[in-house]
Amino acid sequence: MEILAIIPARGGSKGIPNKNIQNVGGIPLVVRTINAALKSKLINKIIVSTDDNRIADVAIDNGVEVIKRPSKISGDTASSELALLDTLIQIKNRDNYVPEIIVFLQCTSPFTELDDIDGTINALVSSDADCALTVTKFNHFLWKYDKNKGSLIGVNHDGKKQRKCRQELSTQYLETGSVYVMKTKEFIKYKKRFFGRIAYHVIPKHRVFEIDEPVDLTISNFIHSKS
């Protein structure tokens, strides 16, 4: 089974300039993701999709291939799915290469490990699902504001009835944002990361962290220093 990992890593970022080459634990985010993918026992090929020459050089120096991402799909509003589709089109046209499965890895999750990747691939394969993702167990009280009632109302509980212990809530799953796995043909058809039957792989909460703002880099480096 041919499995391709794609790591989208565009250069522009308003929240954190040059975000994908910022360091956590002295290692650029894109390199941390590359290193995790290189440890996989299941992935056959790794490609970084980027519009940025600095990111491209870092990726090549760390042993993976680079596909140049067109500027028209590299802006703030461009979806990661567009980068995945562009990569698949380019490698098919160039090498006639079409993997059976693609693994979409996000650089903004700095603590991704081998088990997260191979575990999600195995979850898809073993359940014959169409796509899969990493999640973590979520047992918290959720509220939303109902403007018609002018009040907060419970989402996964009834706050006005006898309050349950948090552990009594039905188990829900929080999407981690780190690893997504998809059957290639179906992904090309639907052009979304979720379709058909969706499998999941549970990872521990301490590996669930996404970098969106400058303070997240500070927190990530602190977490790394304590690990």
Image (tube, helix red, strand yellow):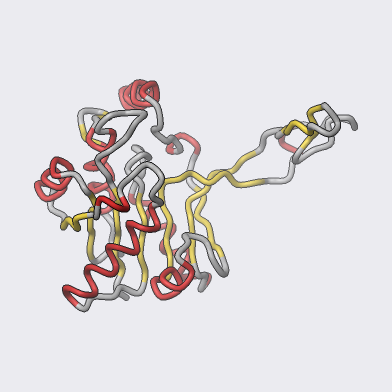
Q: Position of residue 219 (x, y in %)?
A: 38, 22
Q: Image point 86% across, 31% down: which residue?
A: 149
Asked if residue 88 lies left or right of residue 212, the reply is left
**At x 25% / y 28%, what residue is drawn?**
25
Q: Residue at x 46, y 38 (%)?
A: 208
Tally the marks.
0
Relative placement, left or right, of 92 versus 161 is left
* Residue, far bottom: 96
Which image quarter is the C terminus in? Answer: top left
Position of 227 relative to 188 (above/below): above
Q: Which of the 4 image quadrants contains residue 168?
A: top right
Above or below residue 76? Residue 200 is below
Residue 227 seen from this side? no
User: Residue at left 47%, top 60%?
Assistant: 193
Image: 53 above or below 63: above
From the top left corner, tell me how far across and down residue 104 is, in percent. 36, 56
Q: Is residue 198 left or right of residue 16?
A: right
View extreme (front): residue: 72
- Quarter of the image holding residue 100? bottom left
Residue placed most toward the observer, 61 or 214: 214
Q: Nearer the viewer, residue 163 or 83?
A: 83
